[in-house]
Image: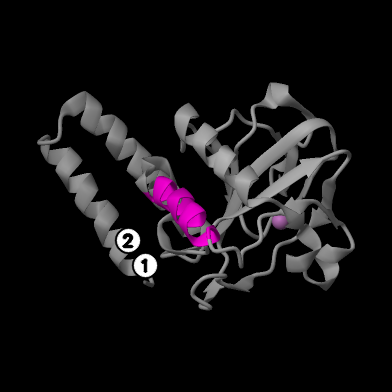
Amino acid sequence: MLLHLPEVLSPDEVRTLREQLDAVGWSSGQATAGAQAAQVKRNQQLDTAHPRFAELSGRMAAALRRHPLFVAAALPARLLAPMFNRYEGGEHYGDHIDNAVQTDRLSGQLLRTDVSTTVFLSDPQDYEGGELIASDHFGTHEVKLAAGDAILYPATSLHRVEPVTRGVRLAAFLWTQSLVRCPVQRGMLFDLDMSIVALRGELGERHPQVAALTGHYHRLLQQWAQP
Ligand code: NI
């Protein structure tokens, strides 16, 4: 499942973040590529050892944790510190699958990657190419969103970033270890949650069946969650 998260960051927040990222500067993405990824990765990244990385990354993580759709769909247990990348002048990232277990840049903690997220920080009209292409059981999807919007997709997806042939593409990206490891269970909880939210709007918070379904959601989460 791919899920579009609208307005993770406001236009003002995007502008401020971009200014601060450019002030820090960019280094080669090769530094953080594994052996397989190094063959196909051509981009720039914010140096995670830079003293300002923790603050910028933390602000990005906080914005996601505040987003109701992100929380409902990813059911985050732990977030790997969001990182930032930049593509220009034909840079791209060929087909690859992200590592299933990764070390957090800030805490050194090992996390299982269940859910991938890309937050777009450049407006689509400011660059040519740069689509995120992700494949799942339903086919191949092409994603290019407004600045501040994000896409959430399974961390097991084969994916790539198309060459950026004009302008600059900035993005934040991160992985989440979910409370619910199984994507089928996570998807069922998300669908149930969205139905409850819709019914609550129609029937009101205090309708007995809304309360009953909410209880059902939490019983399922209690069965499946592994904090
Ligand atoms: Ni990737």
13 in relation to 86, above or below = above
Dots 2, 1 in contact, CB < 8 A: yes
Q: Residues within 10 Å of mark 2 (few under 14, many from 20)?
A: some
Q: Which residues are magenta?
A: 52-65
Q: Which quarter of the image is occupied by the N terminus?
A: top right
Residue 4 appears in view? yes
Please tell me which residue is depicted at 58% across the width and 39% down the height of the picture. Answer: 18
Residue 7 covered by magenta stretch? no
State how far apart marks 2 and 1 are (Cα).
5 Å
Q: Which element is circle 2 on?
A: helix
- The kind of residue on which mark 1 rests is Ala
Position in image of residue 48 (x %, y %): 61, 64
Residue density around tag 1, few if under 14, some if 14–19, many if 20 or more, within 10 Å: some
Q: Residue at x 67, y 40 (%)?
A: 170
Please give the label number shown on residue 4: none
- Determine which residue is flagged by label 2: 221
Q: Please identify the dominant SS of the magenta region.
A: helix
Q: Position of residue 150 (x, y in %)?
A: 55, 39
Between 70 and 47, the one nearer to me in the picture:
47
- 16, above or below 153, in the image: above
Give the residue number, with chain letter if any, for mark 1: 225
**Apparent side of residue 225 relative to residue 115 in the rendered image (left or right):** left
Indicate the quadrant where residue 151 lies.
top right
Looking at the rendered image, the quarter that the C terminus falls into is bottom left
